[in-house]
Image: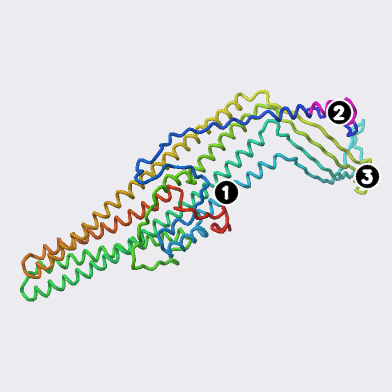
């Protein structure tokens, strides 16, 4: 490699000035050439309206719409407090925040390539060299010598072909995707907590119902034993009553396992060891919130996972540009200055100073198809991210449709189930009265009690399904019903340790 050096005054000579102007214009022309591939619009076959569109309005894009404390629609202060703890202490959210911080740091690394690199060096050495005379004997008269040096170096690679610009665009898109992933992780954890908490409250209601059933069966057993001692019924009726009571007690006990597991899951979500976390049971069941008409169509396009997928498409597109720049030569401008002396006191004296300045142009002439393969790989990666983005959009519509249908159908089913419970309770009351009057055997009472208990349990099960569907619908729409302002990314709701 040949390196040419020139005195600074030589740059101002007329001939060299003309060369410098021509070189500058050439660099400007080269810099105007861009390898940035045009980002083609990703065409999506998006339906104009939801299939489950009863009462819903036409969609309007609201990508920048805020996401607020959507869980407040359940009017539960305990849930509000738990959601704040998830934002502050959940470790999965901390990991997502760290990934976002890493992506922003890598963006800064990419931007730094626009600027020159400056370095400094200093060294000191002591050496002695021996010589051999004509007769083959060693000359021991040489003395050790000292060498001291200090210098500065600078180098800069102009972004002639847009490689750095494309790398910055790639890093920025990656950071934006990480930001959307952080929001998606936060929303997913919030929804998981809400589902688990609401199901725990439904389990509390089931435990209360099971306790009431056990108490009722205990009274029925006592009544049957009294009638047996009076000679009105046989021992078979007593055995049936005792069997029914024991079965109810088993169900009541088993619900404790379900509640304990739900409480442990909530503890992990809020970053607390399960042994140090406890939620007291409450005497009220959660209510299913009413969804205002028009909300789903307006909020679906706010989903953070859609934003993350779209940003990954932009990242893959910029990566094609990075791969294409490998076909062009690279220009490096370097400079060096310093001092090299034998005595330390003369280190910065004028005679010891040296300098060098010059460009280096490098180009790859043969690589056995490596660059073509890199470009093909980047293009294939782009097609992959486009397909993933389209699939994410389709999945988003499916989730919204599923939960819209669940909300509508389960509401009708809950109304029918309420009528079923009322009919079963009336049948049980008649069976008890007829048994006390000696008109029917105790088997009729047992059948009516089982029917009423099953109907009440099914009603609570429907309540749990409706609550889950409401949370999943909110999550499918990107979170929140209204215009509450979302916290800034990486601010108070997520603590960075």
- Disc 3 designates what residue? 349
Decide which of 391, 410 is in the foreground and name it.
Answer: 410
Which tag is nearer the camera, tag 2 or tag 3? 2
Mark 2 and mark 1: span between their CA atoms? 48 Å
Question: Which sits earlier in the primary sequence, circle 2 or circle 1?
Answer: 2
User: What's the CA distance linking mark 2 and mark 3?
Assistant: 31 Å
Q: Nearer the viewer, residue 385 or 373?
A: 385
Q: Are marks 2 and 1 in contact (CB under 8 Å)?
A: no
In this rendering, the label closer to the viewer, 2 or 1:
2
* Dot 2 alpha-carbon crowd within 10 angstroms: few under 14, some 14 to 19, many 20 or more: few
Q: Quadrant of residue 204?
A: bottom left
Q: Residue 96 versus residue 390: which sits nearer the camera?
A: 390
Q: Which residues are magenta?
A: 10-23
Q: Are marks 2 and 3 in contact (CB under 8 Å)?
A: no
Residue 342 versus residue 416 in the image, above or below: above
Q: Give the crowd class for mark 1: few <14, some 14-19, many >=20 residues within 10 Å.
A: many
Q: Secondary structure at mark 3?
A: loop
Residue with the mark numbered 1: 100
Disc 3 versus disc 1: nearer the observer? 1
Element under label 1?
A: helix
**Could you give the CA–CA distance between mark 3 and mark 1, rounded to whole angstroms?**
51 Å
Relative horizontal placement of residue 188, taking residue 457 as reference (left or right): right
Q: Position of residue 307 (x, y in %)?
A: 51, 43
Neighbourhood count class around disc 3 (C-alpha, 10 Å): few under 14, some 14–19, many 20 upward: few
- Seen at 41% across and 37% down, the residue is 48
Judging by the rendered image, the residue that carries numbered circle 2 is 17
Residue 15 painted magenta? yes
Please indicate whether residue 352 sits to the left or right of residue 451 in the image. Answer: right
Q: Secondary structure at mark 2?
A: helix
Q: Is residue 168 left or right of residue 141?
A: left
- Which quarter of the image is occupied by the C terminus? bottom right
């Amino acid at each position: 490699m040949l390196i040419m050096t020139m005195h600074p005054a030589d740059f101002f000579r007329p001939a060299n000035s003309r060369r410098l102007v021509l070189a500058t214009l050439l660099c400007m022309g080269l810099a105007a050439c861009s390898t940035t591939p045009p980002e083609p619009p990703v065409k999506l076959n998006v339906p104009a309206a939801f299939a489950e569109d009863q009462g819903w309005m036409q969609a309007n894009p609201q990508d920048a719409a805020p996401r607020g404390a959507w869980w407040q629609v359940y009017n539960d202060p305990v849930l509000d407090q738990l959601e704040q703890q998830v934002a502050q202490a959940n470790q999965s959210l901390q990991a997502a925040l760290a990934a976002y911080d890493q992506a922003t740091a890598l963006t800064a690394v990419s931007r730094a390539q626009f600027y020159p690199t400056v370095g400094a060096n200093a060294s000191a050495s002591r050496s002695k060299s021996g010589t051999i005379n004509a007769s083959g004997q060693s000359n021991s008269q040489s003395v050790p010598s000292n060498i001291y040096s200090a210098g500065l170096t600078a180098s800069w690679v102009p972004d002639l072909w847009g490689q750095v610009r494309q790398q910055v665009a790639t890093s920025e898109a990656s950071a934006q995707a990480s930001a959307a992933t952080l929001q998606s992780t936060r929303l997913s954890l919030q929804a998981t907590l809400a589902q688990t908490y609401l199901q725990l409250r439904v389990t509390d209601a089931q435990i209360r119902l099971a306790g009431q059933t056990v108490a009722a069966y205990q009274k029925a057993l006592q009544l049957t034993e009294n009638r047996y001692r009076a000679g009105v019924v046989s021992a078979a009726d007593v055995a049936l009553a005792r069997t029914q009571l024991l079965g109810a007690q088993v169900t009541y006990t088993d619900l404790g396992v379900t509640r304990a597991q739900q409480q442990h899951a909530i503890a992990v979500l809020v970053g607390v060891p399960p042994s140090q976390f406890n939620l007291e049971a409450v005497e009220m069941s959660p209510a299913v919130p009413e969804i205002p008409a028009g909300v789903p169509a307006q909020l679906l396009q706010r989903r953070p996972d859609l934003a993350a997928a779209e940003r990954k498409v932009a990242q893959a597109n910029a990566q094609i540009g990075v791969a294409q720049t490998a076909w062009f030569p690279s220009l490096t401008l370097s400079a060096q200055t310093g001092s090299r002396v034998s005595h330390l006191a003369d280190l910065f004296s004028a005679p010891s100073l040296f300098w060098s300045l010059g460009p280096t142009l490098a180009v790859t002439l043969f690589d056995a198809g490596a660059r073509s393969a890199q470009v093909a790989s980047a293009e294939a990666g782009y097609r992959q991210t486009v397909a993933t983005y389209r699939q994410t959009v389709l999945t988003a519509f499916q989730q919204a449709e599923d939960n819209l249908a669940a909300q509508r159908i389960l509401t009708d089913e809950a109304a029918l189930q309420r009528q079923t419970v009322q009919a079963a309770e009336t049948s049980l009351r008649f069976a008890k009265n007829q048994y006390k009057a000696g008109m029917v055997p105790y088997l009729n009472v047992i059948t009516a009690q089982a029917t009423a208990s099953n109907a009440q349990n099914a009603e609570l099960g429907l309540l749990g399904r409706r609550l889950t569907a409401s949370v999943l619908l909110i999550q499918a729409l990107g979170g929140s019903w209204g215009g509450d302002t979302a916290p800034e990314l990486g601010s108070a709701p997520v603590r960075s340790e």
